[in-house]
Amino acid sequence: MSAVRRRPGEALQRGVVILPSAFTLGNLFFGLYAMVAASRGDFVWAGWFIIFAGTLDMLDGRIARFTRTGSRFGAELDSLVDAISFGVAPGFIMYRLFFTDTQWSWTLAFFYVTAVVVRLARFNIEQAGEAKRYFHGLPSPAAGMLLASFYPFSRTAFFESYLNGFPWAQIIAMGMVLLSVLMVSHVPYPIVPRIGLRTARGLATMAFVLAALFAAIAVPRYYFFPALLLYATWGLVKSVLLGLLDRLPGGDPLRDVGESDTADDRAEVRDLDYGPLASDAAYLGDASAADDPDDRAGSPHSPENYT
């Protein structure tokens, strides 16, 4: 029996299809390894493993779109892995760091993980596993990396000199609750901008991304936690400010441009004469009544039939 011949590009195509899932499984590997490191007391590397997982999570979707190998299977696998790498693993790290001494403090980790899985499920339904213009709610990778990068940041000289005296256990507890609320909220968060070389905006975006990449490589302990904290805060502050601006009255819509909106006793009172409009309306009404056959005498809709 002769062997089935395969097309020359079939093996290559299969390799291309597997590539995004390989990055997703690498994300899972670092998420699990972060929990192993935290259980051994190595919280610095536990935080970096979550950062590695977030990097692979950012790349797998872009590789799938670039190679046109995206599938529903890949989207579901990515969500399941994200629930572990950015939900269970950061929650476990925070529990081991701050909440092992009290009996019910583990519920903070439960609350956080619950928000992560709800946010991922809603993301798959509302945005079909891919954000178009912005994220609805804080992305779970950003929340997970924010929590995990705290301990490496706390080992810096700046933290030891200026921030070490704060009650960080209480701050982290409130921060986990706030991050959970932001993940399941509808606060819009910007996606990673696209790089381009044809427009000034694309060039500016490329310069910004390159500067961020340089800072992440050169001073990672000083970069990730402040940058992620700024991202989480920026979406909330922007939404609050835009919401307040939308609710502010825009002034008198009939007032001319350049006039003050402040009420003043010396303000001129304008007398509005609607006489010409009223006469025109009466004229139009009489003309339409004369032309309408239903208003003629004997019509069932005539005023004579309602007396």
Image (cartoon, rainbow, N blue to C red):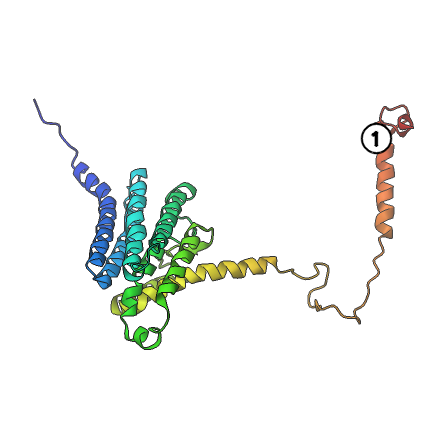
Count of numbered circles in the view: 1
- Would residue 9 be found to the left or right of residue 215 on screen? left
The residue nearer to you, when weighing 279 against 168, is 168
**Farthest residue, direction left:** 1
Question: What type is the residue that disc 1 sits on?
Answer: Asp
Residue 106 visible? yes
The residue nearer to you, when weighing 305 against 111, is 111
The residue nearer to you, when weighing 11 against 35, is 35
Q: Residue at x 15, y 32 (%)?
A: 6
Residue 135: x, y in percent?
Answer: 42, 51
Q: Residue at x 37, y 44 (%)?
A: 129
How crowded is the residue under tag 1: few (<14 C-alpha within 10 Å), some, or many (20+)? few
Is 48 placed above or below 163 here? above
Question: SS of the residue at dot 1?
Answer: loop
Name the image quarter holding residue 55. bottom left
Is 54 placed above or below 117 here? below
Residue 202 visible? no
- Would residue 62 be found to the left or right of residue 200 on screen? left
Residue 64: x, y in percent?
Answer: 29, 45
Dividing the image into 4 quarters, which one contains the N terminus?
Answer: top left
Q: Residue at x 58, y 60 (%)?
A: 245
- Would residue 303 be found to the left or right of residue 60 on screen? right
